[in-house]
Image (cartoon, rainbow, N blue to C red):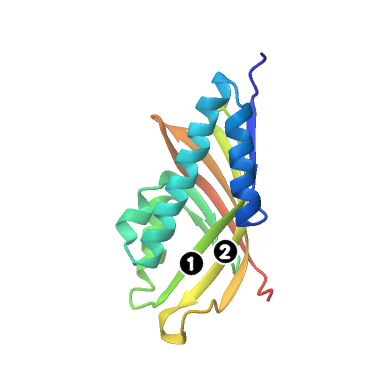
Amino acid sequence: MRSQKKIIFRNSNSFTFIFRGLIAILVISFTQVNAQTDVEQIIKVRKTSNEALRSFDNELSYTVLTDDVMITTGNGTLINGKEAYKKYDNEFDNNTMYWIRTTDELELNMERGLAWESGIWKGYDLKKGSNPIINGKYSAMWTKESGEWKIKSQLFVTLNKK
């Protein structure tokens, strides 16, 4: 069997995600098993990142970023580097907002050690209840550094769709 160079994961809803996951397990080859492990690693890191943001654990949230990360915020602010992001983040010390990202698509290129992720993000404010108050779409570029997947760049676009 030829090895595939990329693995694609799309999530339109929970049932589809589970169904596709079960089908994928049944048909993947040995080389795809390694790629599936990488997909699982990225999903786990995204979950860790979301949990860190939800619990306001900034230090943990920084561990998923490369030192040279580039982030474009929902309002278009460009942040270049992890240290710059920490300074930006510290401007909002008493902030009660957090963001959760939900992956819709994840595609890996194992030869280059790169991955593309896209999905939706929702912003919550603890002072305003449990419903999101802002939302949009995002994309992320992942890179595998020393065996670990980290976020190299992220782009957030605020859309506020209901």
- 153 or 122: nearer the viewer: 122
Q: In which quarter of the image is residue 157?
A: bottom right
Neighbourhood count class around disc 2 (C-alpha, 10 Å): few under 14, some 14–19, many 20 upward? many
Looking at the image, residue 48 lies above or below residue 27: below
Q: Report the residue at 69% width, 74% height from top.
A: 161
- Residue under circle 1? 99
Check the picture and name the quadrant holding the N terminus: top right
- Residue under circle 2? 121
Looking at the image, residue 14 lies above or below residue 93: above
Q: Report the residue at 55% width, 19% height from top.
A: 30
- 100 or 95: nearer the viewer: 100
Percent position (x, y) of residue 146? Answer: 38, 29
Looking at the image, residue 124 lies above or below residue 11: below
Q: Report the residue at 46% width, 86% height from top.
A: 128
Percent position (x, y) of residue 21? Answer: 59, 41
Q: Do the residues labelled 2 and 1 touch (CB within 8 Å)?
A: yes
At mark 1, the secondary structure is strand
* Amino acid at the residue labelled 1: Trp
Percent position (x, y) of residue 119? Answer: 62, 56
* Amino acid at the residue labelled 2: Trp
First in sequence, mark 2 or 1: give its number: 1
Looking at the image, residue 30 lies above or below residue 115: above
